[in-house]
Image: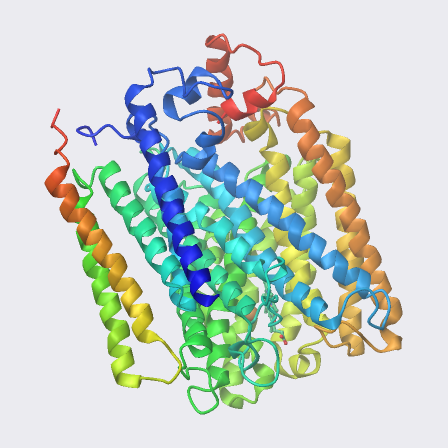
Amino acid sequence: MDENPGLSEQYRMASPWPLFVALGLPIAEIGILFDIPALSIGGLILFCGSVAGMVQEAGYARTPWRALAACAVLLFALGGLFFYADAQFGAEGIRFVARGWAIVVAGGVLLFGSVVGSLLVDEPEPV
Amino acid sequence: MELNGQLALTVLMGLFLVAVAAWLARVENWRSYTPLGSGGGGYGQESGYVSQEKPSGFIRWLTTVDHKDIGMLYGAFGVTAFLVGGAMVMLMRAELTVPEMTLISNQFYNSLMTSHGITMLFLFGTPIIAAFSNYFIPLVIGADDMAFPRINAIAFWLLPPAALLIWAGFFPVPDVIPAQTSWTMYTPLSAGVGQGNQANAGVDLMLLGLHLSGISATMGAINFIVTIFTERAEEVTWANLDIFSWTILTQSGLILFSFPLLGSALLMLLADRNLGTTFFAVDGGGPMLWQHLFWFFGHPEVYILVLPPMGLVSYILPRFSGRRLFGFKFVVYSTLAIGVLSFGVWAHHMFATGMDPRLRASFMAVSMAIAIPSAVKTFNWITTMWNGSIRLTAPMLFCIGFVSNFIVGGVTGVFLASIPVDLVLHDTYYVVGHFHYIVMGAIAFAGFAGLYYWYPIYTGRMYQRSLAKWHFWLWMIGSNVTFFAMILLGYGGMPRRYATYLPQFTDLHQVASIGAFIMTLGALIFLWNFVVSWYEGPVVRDGDPWDLKEDSLYTTEWEWFDRKLKTAVADGGEALPGGEESDAAEN
Ligand code: HEM
Ligand SMILES: [Cu+2]
């Protein structure tokens, strides 16, 4: 926390992240349930991004990049589960594959962000 | 058209994410460049305290992780949900003044009934309890804050989206209708199969909203368990932990074991509805599976809702009886006993389903047993008041009303727990009367006892006492008129959950509606008093507005309040003219 002044650095009792964690989750849930890729992907990015930001702010990690990568891995696994369900049951009219792709794409975006972030953004200097 | 919609949505989502990112970047800016103490500038300049700890104005409420602020947010949310749920039921009571369908359609009645139940239990009951626990538990156990302040904020912020989803069917969205499943969401109706209209997306949205509120409750519960275990001040031991914290701890344990189960059951139901699974289908797991899963959650849920209000009453009632709580230890033990037993009684909601009579008898036995710890508490409250020097302030009146109504609710519950009685009364208004005596007569009364008791702490002002007493008496009379009429209706055989009824029930239904209108009047008086006193009530300058020191019943949260009053004066405390700023700053 010290190395990276956050909102909660100056304002000890405030953090911008919880609101967006709580907003990302329902958006992602609606998107996945109703098979609306825009909401699935956007919601997952918002949710995971905010979680990563919060992990950093709370001092559990120095940068958010690894947390983003971890989220991406979890999303790949979840997407894989949807592909598996489709292969196993292949119920007609249910678009498991499309839902799975949306999740995987969200994971891909996060992974991309993680890689770009760790390569291009300077590490905050330790104080 | 389909593709265009998707495209538009994608663009919108993208814009939204960019906006969020931009906003977050601005947040970075202030934190890096705003000199300390100038608090973001602009309109919301508040006292130095706030601007050093939190940004000012509206942003403060969006970003706060302070347990007191979050308690206030929960409180505002809970009271709002209470008004919404109350408005819904008043439409229903208006419809029920005549036997035929007149004012609203049967479908709309069913939608309102479903929403009323879910709103009151999940959007009013749980949040209003969280309002008190968030604000006061850290203060009374001497913690700086909750163990996980950010998780605390997430738990709150999940609730507004949950409410929007639960009410989504009422908004003018094309092709989305409100759920009509009732709060118990029994399959097969809620699975959307058959000829009905419950395959509609409105039901899915409601289920999602409920799921979110469950996540919120679970996060809150984990937070309270950790806080009470690890954040207590040194002088607060298990032996002298206050009764309210005990009930919140027990409640959190119950939440931890029951809400995740509800969440899983809801996901199974959603999968049945949307992904072709057969958990609750007749050829699959069977519709009865839902009832077991639901009530394994549902019965603990009623104790999740009632234990903390019992804690509030055990906390507040002695302070106006001039003595300590009688048999403190036994009140704690009975809380724990109820917590354990509440997981062993769920099938008393299913006596009429044709289950194995031997199983049924054992559930009857446990259900009767759970009445014992409830009675222990009741006797302890009565003995606390016995020969005490009772002061009938508004919070005390609400506590006494709680005890009185809880007795009627509890005794009718014991009758229902008896199989032969239940087979007659199941699914009649008797059941509705039973649980409303508890959820409205007891739980809501305790909530309002808390709102009045701590009013000076969270507003810095005092409410108008005579109006508060009007509120109490209108509610005490109104709730007994309404819910006793329901008990009589049940004896007469009036089935629950109908928008229309046979003419012989007209009189009692009209009586019930009159009671409900009396309560509405009380609620309006409350609202007026609550809001107006917040702005214009007499400022409290005494850290002991209830004269608790005289009987040495003073507690830590008032000490904290007293300290705050004194430091505010030392700061110069520029008596802010309007008053509302000082309310905001007070947190
Ligand atoms: C003294 C302990 C209690 C006993 C023995 C008891 C017993 C029962 C029984 C047997 C039923 C099922 C009636 C039926 O549907 O045929 C019932 C329903 C209900 N009880 Fe209680 N009860 C007790 C306390 C409570 C408390 C403390 C609450 C609330 C906080 C509560 C809330 C409810 C609710 C909401 C229902 C109706 C559920 C529904 O079908 O919608 N009960 N109770
Ligand atoms: Cu029960």
Q: Quadrant of residue A102?
A: bottom left
Q: Quadrant of ligand 2?
A: bottom right
Q: How many marks?
A: 0
Residue at image coords 39%, 69%: B264
Closer-to-camera residue (B386/B268): B268
Q: Quadrant of residue B539?
A: top right
Q: Position of residue B345 (x, y in %)?
A: 50, 73
Q: Position of residue B360 (x, y in %)?
A: 53, 84
Q: State the colouring used for the structure image.
A: rainbow
Q: Position of residue B265 (x, y in %)?
A: 43, 72
Residue A64 seen in this snapshot: yes
Residue B323 higher or lower than B496, as above or below: above
Closer-to-camera residue (B520/A43): A43
In screen coordinates, is B467 left or right of A104? right
Residue at image coords 72%, 33%: B529
Residue B477 seen in this snapshot: no
Q: Quadrant of residue A85?
A: bottom left
In screen coordinates, is B471 left or right of B84? right
**Residue farthest bottom in this picture:** B283
Residue B91 higher or lower than A123, as above or below: below
Q: Position of residue A30 (x, y in %)?
A: 43, 62
Closer-to-camera residue (B114/B490): B114
Closer-to-camera residue (B271/B4): B4
